[in-house]
Image (cartoon, coloured by chain):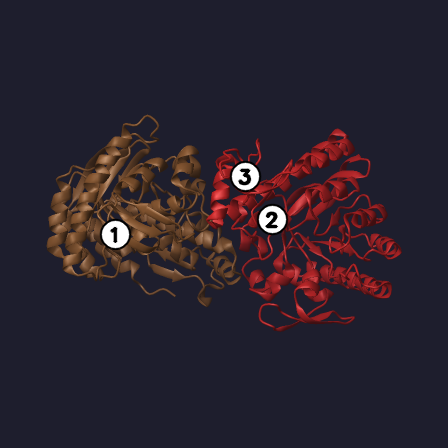
Chain colours: A red, B brown
């Protein structure tokens, strides 16, 4: 594996992460396939037609249902879901803290109840890494706690110190697993995660500590969970510069097109977010002029594609009027077409971002694009 | 338009119906796109990859929601749903009698309440044909009453006589509309519908009367609504021979693969049925060895495709284990993959049927195939 910084433009980075499953051109948006499938009836075959580079799957979900051991037995997640490109798996930490019930955190890890069947499960750093190793993902994420942005300073400080100790254990466990003969991906990468809620000094101190560990990449976690956009950008302003410039930086769970453009400006390489698929399933489409609600009566007789010039599978063949009709009739196809459009939009937005950095006018492009994207649409 | 009888093998016919939207090789299975979309998130683009020849859309559904006048204004159903091949529209009659509420039948037509918004609507032969003309379908169906298979003889006799009078009015209205300058499809075809419940003499007398009208094709309606398979085959045995041999024959709403094989043996050309898409959405897959329930635990570790050798978009890329996993996780993609597999199965079954007729061994092929299809699968 290698990360190569191809072009810099201000703090914005245009990079390339080479992995056993292929190169990832950054900045890049990962398409969320929670249980090994993109919600909205989008198959891995479809992903090729919408420019997807990397798929993100959820460790917690795959562990509590179907199970990583079965998926390993069946050949790993790549073969299971029919996707040959890179896959990043999260650590399960965020879901344990947001979805599971009755959780108890100790130094060893977290005991919780599955949201599916109430079964008691223990997950610590070693368990999380073992699950991700069973799945055989390209990039594994370190197991962390994601404290609430409203948690008090003392709690956050102790939590972050434990997350650091967990990171060491994750690294050691992955090293051990990588050398075992029956490990699916012996070159699995590990990204560490910066935490610290909205406390500047905890964030920066933690960034310094994990930067010294020479990991394959660094994520910024615990954002987009209730703080304002300005607070989020501020955390990026103070944190990203402390992370190694020659390593990929991943802002977890973010966000709107504008959030992404602003975060790239601050040096972020990787993104993931459920917005394009979730909003698509609810009838909303992203365009360069803002978000449209296709349920709106305004589109009833509108024969234009969702966005002129878009070559996604929806815009190539269908009109706004048809999508509006399908939404009114509650046809599943509406969701599918909108999810395809939105993921295509995000994937191609990243292409435009990479081109703007290469051309050396990222700031200007970003300002202009953000202005255009916040027009008022029905 | 022309229907050409290419090969006969016993009563089985291998034909070709040439239309303004392309040739239809028969026997043929029409894929049901009720509101201009196949349920299960299947788009018209997808249909090309599963061998679909003809799409069937429902006049009643398109009339009560979105509306045929709007669809005409937007360029007709073909352009609206992005499908260039032949489309058959039903007359709305069956839905008026099965879905709508508070219906009153008179000589002029039927008054009913929309199942969507309770709106009172009147539909008679002229209205049905006007709607189908607005949609611009390739083949329009005559407006008929579909009496219950349990209706008494007197009721059925009177109903069928009225259906005959309605057929004359449908033919006259279509002729009038075909000559208007702004009609979308000036070569729209009309199929008449044979009714008569399970009364042999009413069926055959009605078949003789409509056969004399020299229509573009003939359908047999009112079957698969509660009678046994043997009763259905018996009606075909006595009715199909009374219909013109040099015209396409369509058995409405039928059925299982075995029903179709048996009906082809009795001279039927066209079929439609919601089974492949409905069963797919419920986790069932058709194979040459019978129907599988992919929810069954037996498939949890099964890395084979649903059917070995099948080149549908599901079997080409995904295992039974993956589909089982998606069903357990209630992922929409499971439905889509199973609907694609099932429609592909039906479309390709018709290809095998056509080949067997061409090879002159249809009866032998049919017996063997039916035996194989009724093995016990989990």
| Foreground of the two, B299 or B95 | B95
The percent coordinates of residue B177 (x first, y second) are: 28, 32
Q: What element carries label 1?
A: strand
| Foreground of the two, B44 or B66 | B66
Left or right: residue A163 compared with residue B88:
right
**Badge 3: few (under 14), some or many (20 or more) residues near its Cα, within 10 Å?**
few
Residue at x-position 43% and y-position 50%: B39
- Which residue position holds label 2? A279
Dot 2 falls on which chain?
A: A
- Which residue position holds label 3? A298
Residue at x-position 29% and y-position 46%: B350
Q: In which quarter of the image is the C terminus of chain B?
A: bottom left
The percent coordinates of residue A232 (x first, y second) are: 79, 49
Q: Do labels 2 and 3 share a chain?
A: yes
Q: What element carries label 3?
A: helix
The percent coordinates of residue B83 (x first, y second) are: 40, 37
Q: Can residue B15 be seen in this view?
A: no
- Which residue position holds label 1? B105
Distance CA(mark 1)–CA(mark 3):
37 Å
Asked if the residue under mark 3 is in contact with the one under mark 1, i.e. CB atoms within 8 Å, the reply is no
């Amino acid at each position: 594996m290698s990360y190569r910084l191809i072009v810099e433009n201000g703090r914005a980075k245009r990079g390339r992460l080479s992995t056993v499953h292929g190169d990832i051109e950054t900045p890049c948006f990962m398409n969320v396939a929670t249980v090994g499938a993109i919600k909205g009836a989008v198959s891995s075959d479809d992903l090729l037609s919408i420019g997807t580079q990397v798929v993100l799957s959820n460790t917690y979900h795959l562990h509590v249902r179907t199970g990583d051991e079965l998926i390993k037995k069946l050949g790993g997640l790549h073969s299971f879901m029919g996707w040959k490109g890179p896959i990043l798996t999260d650590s399960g930490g965020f879901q344990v803290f947001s979805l599971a019930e009755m959780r108890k955190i100790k130094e060893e890890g977290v005991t919780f109840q599955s949201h599916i069947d109430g079964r008691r499960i223990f997950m610590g750093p070693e368990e999380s890494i073992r699950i991700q190793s069973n799945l055989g993902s390209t990039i594994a994420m370190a197991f962390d706690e994601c404290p609430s942005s409203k948690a008090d300073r003392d709690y956050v400080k102790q939590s972050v110190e434990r997350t650091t100790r967990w990171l060491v254990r994750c690294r050691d466990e992955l090293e051990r697993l990588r050398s075992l003969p029956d490990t699916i991906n012996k070159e699995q990468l590990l990204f560490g995660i910066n935490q610290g809620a909205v406390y500047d000094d905890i964030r920066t101190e933690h960034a310094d500590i994990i930067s010294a560990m020479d990991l394959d990449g660094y994520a910024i976690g615990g954002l987009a969970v209730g703080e304002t956009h300005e607070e989020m950008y501020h955390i990026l302003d103070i944190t990203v510069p402390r992370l190694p410039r020659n390593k990929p930086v991943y802002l977890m769970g973010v966000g709107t097109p504008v959030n992404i453009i602003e975060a790239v400006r601050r040096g972020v390489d990787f993104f993931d977010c459920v917005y394009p698929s979730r909003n698509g399933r609810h009838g909303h489409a992203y365009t360069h002029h803002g978000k449209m609600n296709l349920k709106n009566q305004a589109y009833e007789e509108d024969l234009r594609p969702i966005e002129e010039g878009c070559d996604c599978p929806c815009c190539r063949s269908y009109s706004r009027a048809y999508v509006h009709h399908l939404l009114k009739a509650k046809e599943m196809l509406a969701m599918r077409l909108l999810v395809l459009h939105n993921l295509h939009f995000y994937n191609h937005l990243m292409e435009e971002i990479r081109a703007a950095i290469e051309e050396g006018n990222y700031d200007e492009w970003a300002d202009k694009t953000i202005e255009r994207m916040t027009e008022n649409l029905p």
